[in-house]
Amino acid sequence: MKHLKGIKLRHRKNTEDFSTIDFPLPSKIILPMSMHMGVPCTPLVKVGDCVRVGEKIGDCEAPFSVPIHSSVSGKVTAISDYRNAVGAVCKAVEIETDGKQEIYENIAPPVITDRGSFIKAVRECGVCGLGGAGFPTHIKLNPKNEIDTLIINAAECEPYITSDYREMLENTNDILSGIEFIKNILGIKNVKIAVEGNKPKAIEIFEELTKHDNDVEIHTLPSVYPQGAEKVIIYNTTGRIVKEGTIPAEVGVIVINVSTVGFIYRYSQTGMPFITRRITVDGNAVKESKNIFAPVGTPIVDILNFCKTDIDSLKAVISGGPMMGMCIPDINMPISKTTNALLAFNKYDDRKTSACIRCGRCADVCPFNLVPAEIDKAYKIRDVEDLLALKVNLCMNCGSCTYVCPANRKLAETNQLAKTILPKM
C-alpha cells in the first residue's frame, strides 16, 4: 500500500533503554483547570482545604471536558488565574504537599457492566489523549458511528521522546488487557497496533504475545515522520481517508494512544484516576537524561533540576517533541496530563529568515499535499477564499514544511495563524 509523504529525521532516542523511575515528591504542585481540549474545569476546593491523592478537585458539567484530581495529599494554598503556554487563561489550584501521600477514601475500581458505565468510568478517571493533543478519551470512545477497527497509536515518531516506548516494554500486559477490554465493551472486531519500524524490541514482544489472537495485527510503520498523526496512521494502516471536516469515526475507526490504553486497564483494576505522567527528559542542557513518573502538576523547574539540567545556560525548553511541541515561557509552570517529554536546550537553530525561493520543498514533504508557500502568501493578504481553496484546515501542524525550508520560514506556524481568520465551520 502506498504511504503518505513525510520526512526522515534523526530520532535521537537517547533514553530508549532507560527504565522509568519515580520522581521524588515535590514540595508543591500546580493544577491548571484546563489540561485537555474542551471546556476548563471549575475548582471544587477552596484555600485551606486538605486534599488526598486521587481526590477530585476540579470538574465541569460540559460533556466536552474531563475532571482533574489531586496527585498529592496536602493543603490548598492558592487558587489563582493561570496563563498557559498559548496565552489562554484558566484557574489553577496550588497544593502544598504534606509528604504523607494519603489515598482518598473513595478510591475503588469502577463498576463496569456495559458500554454506558464504561464511558462514565473513563470520564471520571480524568484521562485524555496522552499523545499530546489532549482530546477527552470518553468522547473518542463513544462515537455515534459504527466502529470496526481500533488502531493503537504506538508510533512515537517525534525525536527524543521514549515515554510510549517504555510503556510498551514495561506495561505490555496492561496494554493488551486494555485492548481486549475496550474491544469487548465497544464490540470492535479488528485491532491494529501500529508501531514504527525503529522499535524492533516492542514489535517482537507484541508479535509474540498476540500470535494466537486473530483479531489483533501488529502493523509495522516506516520510520518516516509524521507516522503518529491521526489521519496519517489511519491511511497508512487501513487505506481509509479521513476527509476535511470529518472525524475518524466516520470511516469506522478509533485511534487511541498506547499509553492511554494501558492506563485505562490499570484504572479499571485500581480506581486510581489519572494523576501521574511518564515523561522523557532530554536535550543538550540535560546532564542526566531520564524517563520519569512525576505527579501531574509538578513544576518543570523541579524536574529539570532532578535531571541535573544547567538552568543558567537554557535557551529553550520544549514540552513535547521538537517538531510539534510547545516552547515553555516559564520553567516554573507545571507539567500537565499531556506532557510526554521535556526537552531542554542551551543552543538551537537561530538562522535568519529570508525570502521564499520557490523551491517547492514544503509541498514535496506535506503528507496532505498542501502548498505551505501559497498558504503563507494568502495569509499575508488575508485572502480567506484562497485559504479555504488551499485546504489550510487540513494542516495538522506536523512542522515538516518548516523543517525542510532552506529560507527558514515558519510555515507551519503561519498555517495555524491562517486558520484563526477562517469562518467557523
Image (cartoon, rainbow, N blue to C red):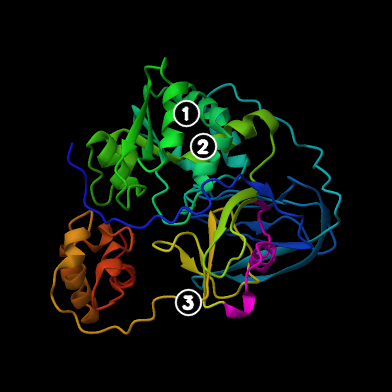
Residue 254 placement, left or right of 392:
right
Instruction: Indicate whether residue 305 is drawn in magenta.
Output: yes
Q: Mark 3 or 2, which is nearer the eye? A: 3
Callout 3: 10 Å neighbours few (<14), some, many (20+)?
Answer: few
Q: Which mark is residue 89?
A: none
Tag 1 secondary structure: helix
Q: Which residue is mark 2?
A: 168
Residue at left 85%, top 62%? 48
Q: Does 384 appear above or below 132?
A: below
Residue at left 27%, top 60%? 393
Give the CA distance from mark 3 to mark 2.
32 Å
Residue type beneath disc 1: Ile
Q: Which residues are magenta?
A: 293-313
Q: Which residue is mark 1?
A: 205
**Is the residue under label 2 in contact with that under label 1 (CB below 8 Å)?**
yes
Q: Does 21 appear above or below 330?
A: above
Residue type beneath disc 3: Lys
